[in-house]
């Protein structure tokens, strides 16, 4: 492919702003069109991309624009139809996670995937600076491979703020109606990060809690698991009083009382502490994910997060919900 990769963005919701910025920063790529059923949202995003066309549907976009790839940023229930439509038009696909509402539908997407077109799930957590730095340190032998870990993801987002509102629902109102919340929507990122850092996952136990009446899904999850042979625990909780409103990651290795990764900072034995600005670093994680897609479409190399990898993770997510019904029945 000699010309810049010509891309259409489908979906103009909250996180699409980071996709738009990522494509604008991506060399040898051009975002040429944005589609959303709410045309006003598509137009608002297109303001940042001079010359970009706007449409209500992917079909309209395909019929007008000469595209190479589609970036899908829509709810999971829409992914299968959009992926099929894009691949029928001969387009490569990058798709936001989760790939589908459940593992069975994700498996159908993988089964029907074109063998001649590239497809990747947009999983930006593993492109965050602290996790890239930790992975490099592990691979270089700068730190020893841990024997155990604890991964805490905490937020006060489902506790009332000074106005009486729940910050997580102000930011993402759709959380309220999701029957599966923390594991499906958020901790899937952290499960992928553990796979990236340590290796394949095995889930031992899971316990989910439902304390916040404003949401249907779980507001706390405790998962005992093994990652690449390393035992650990993943804890997600959106009702932690002294936590920030936005979820904060803290990864503890072995029996350390201080996290190696704390939000957007990392502390390593030899290099000490290093921190990144949360706003710009968050944007960079999207940009690096998009650049990886662009690079590997052009080179033909394997994506870090292919559809079949997303299926494995989605199967694990489903297993966690199944286990939670049997392992610990008593709410926290």
Image (cartoon, rainbow, N blue to C red):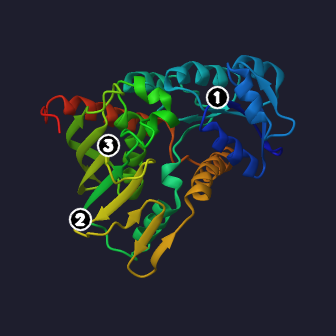
Q: Quadrant of the C terminus?
A: top left
Tell me which corner region of the image, top left, top right, bottom left or bottom right, holds residue 242. bottom left
Residue 100 vertical placement versus 312 (above, below): above
Q: Which x, y percent locates residue 139?
A: 42, 68
Side of 12 relative to 167 (left or right): right
Tell me which corner region of the image, top left, top right, bottom left or bottom right, holds residue 137. bottom left
Q: Nearer the viewer, mark 1 or mark 2?
A: 1
Q: Which x, y percent locates residue 270?
A: 42, 82
Secondary structure beneath disc 1? Answer: loop
Q: Nearer the viewer, mark 3 or mark 2?
A: 3
Label 2 sits on residue: 147
Q: Nearer the viewer, mark 1 or mark 3?
A: 3
Going from N to C along the chain, the mark reached first, 3 or 2, is 2
Between 194 and 165, the one lying in front of the other is 165
**Marks 1 and 3, how far apart at CA:** 30 Å
Residue 26 visible somewhere in the drawing: no
Q: Which x, y percent locates residue 181?
A: 37, 32
Label 3 sits on residue: 239
Label 1 sits on residue: 11
């Amino acid at each position: 492919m000699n010309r810049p990769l010509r891309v259409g963005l489908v979906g103009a919701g909250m996180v699409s702003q980071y996709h738009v910025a990522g494509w604008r920063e991506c060399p040898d790529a051009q975002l040429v069109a944005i589609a959303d059923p709410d045309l006003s949202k598509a137009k608002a995003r297109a303001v940042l991309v001079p010359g970009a066309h706007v449409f209500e549907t992917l079909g309209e976009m395909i019929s007008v624009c000469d595209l190479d790839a589609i970036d899908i940023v829509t709810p999971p229930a829409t992914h299968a139809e959009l992926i099929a439509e894009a691949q029928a038009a001969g387009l490569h696909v990058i798709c936001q996670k989760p790939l589908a509402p459940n593992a069975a539908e994700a498996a159908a997407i993988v089964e029907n995937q074109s063998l001649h077109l590239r497809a990747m799930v947009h999983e930006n957590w593993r492109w965050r600076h602290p996790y890239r730095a930790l992975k490099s340190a592990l691979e270089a032998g700068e730190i020893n491979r841990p024997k155990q870990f604890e991964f805490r993801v905490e937020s006060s987002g489902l506790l009332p703020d000074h106005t009486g509102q729940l910050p997580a629902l102000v930011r993402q109102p759709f959380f309220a109606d999701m029957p599966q919340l923390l594991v499906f929507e958020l901790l899937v990122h952290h499960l992928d990060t553990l796979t990236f850092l340590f290796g394949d996952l095995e889930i031992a136990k899971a316990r989910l809690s439902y304390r916040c009446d404003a949401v249907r899904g779980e507001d706390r999850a405790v998962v005992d698991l093994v990652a690449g042979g390393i035992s650990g625990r993943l804890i997600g909780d959106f009702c932690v009083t002294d936590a920030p409103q936005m979820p904060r990651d803290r990864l503890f290795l072995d029996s350390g009382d201080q996290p190696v990764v704390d939000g957007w900072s990392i502390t390593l034995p030899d290099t000490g502490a290093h921190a990144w600005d949360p706003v710009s670093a968050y944007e960079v994680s999207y940009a690096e994910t998009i650049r990886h897609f662009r690079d590997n479409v052009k080179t033909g190399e394997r994506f870090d997060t292919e559809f079949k990898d997303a299926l494995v993770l989605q199967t694990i997510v489903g297993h966690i919900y199944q286990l939670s019904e049997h392992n610990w029945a008593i709410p926290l």
